[in-house]
Amino acid sequence: MLLLISFLACSSKDAVVPESVAPTATSIPVPVPIKSSDPTATPLEPRVAPVATKVPPTSKPSAPMATPEPTATPEPTATPEPTATPEPTVTSEPTVTPKPLTRVYDVYGFTLELDQDSTFATSNFNVVGVTETDPDSTQGLMSFNYNGTDVVILWRPQNSDTPQDSIAFAYVLQQLGNPDLTFTLLSEGDLTVDGDAGMYTGFLSTDSSGDNAIGGIIGAWACADSSTQLSMTATGSDSTALQIRFDRLISGFSCD
């Protein structure tokens, strides 16, 4: 019995590993030499079990990447042209708008009124500047005809002038404007215009032969509120009509 067991044990040591017992796909096989009882036999080459090559699973082809569209190059923005700087507006002096001529005139700081049957529109009315090109509330000269009487009104800053100074100035203007006439001073006196004290002086002008006498009256006063000195000269061939027209203008005058 013991001999049988020993024999079986030895036989198990010389047994060849069956081919069915193959190494796993992932292990490297160890060659096992096959023993032979014939000493002259050529030893067999060790058989190596083929290594199972693990084929990696075929991956699905990835979807082709979308080719990015080229970014549109923005068109250059047009540079705005510089806006022209507006020139500063020059503020002009307020222009006096002429009023329709009636029998009442009140533009340059005073009011002048004619008779009911008279109007400045039919009196050859004219107004100009004296120290400036255009008249304003401080200076000017006005001329018109009032029912056969020629009238000239002059206004300028009062400064230190007196009514006598204004009368003298107006008298010289008459002489300069009529160099072919001879002038003679007559009476003088006081007058009141719109509550302001003034003076008047009469004169007479004739031609070189002493004929064609023309009478005249010069009045002068100041508007205290506006510090304006005024003089009015009225001339005419009819002394009575001249006196009436002069008095009418003085009574119809007011300082604004």
Image (spheres, rainbow, N blue to C red):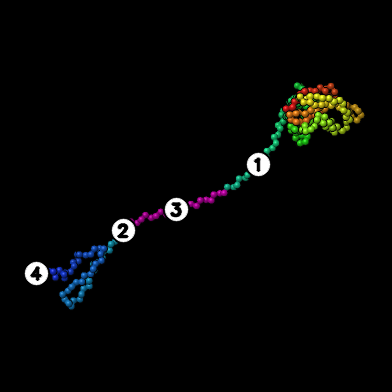
Examine the rendered structure and indicate whether residue 36 appears above or below residue 191: below
Image side of residue 112 versus residue 206, left or right: left
To which quarter of the image does residue 188 belong? top right
CB atoms at circles 3 and 2 under 8 Å apart?
no
Nearer-N-terminus badge (3/4): 4
Location of the C terminus (image quadrant) = top right
The numbered dot on residue 69 is 3
The amino acid marked with disc number 1 is: Pro
Taking depth in this image into account, of 3 and 175 the one nearest to the observer is: 3
To which quarter of the image does residue 26 belong? bottom left
| Principal secondary structure, stretch drawn in magenta | loop
Question: Which x, y percent locates residue 34?
Answer: 19, 71
CB atoms at circles 1 and 4 under 8 Å apart?
no
The numbered dot on residue 58 is 2
Crowding around mark 1 (Cα neighbors within 10 Å: few <14, some 14 to 19, many 20+) is: few
Distance from the alpha carbon under mark 3 to that under mark 4: 90 Å
Is 238 inside the magenta-drawn segment?
no
The amino acid marked with disc number 4 is: Leu
Q: Which residue is mark 4?
A: 2
Distance from the alpha carbon under mark 1 to that under mark 4: 138 Å
Measuring 10% from the left and 68% from the top, which residue is drawn there? 5
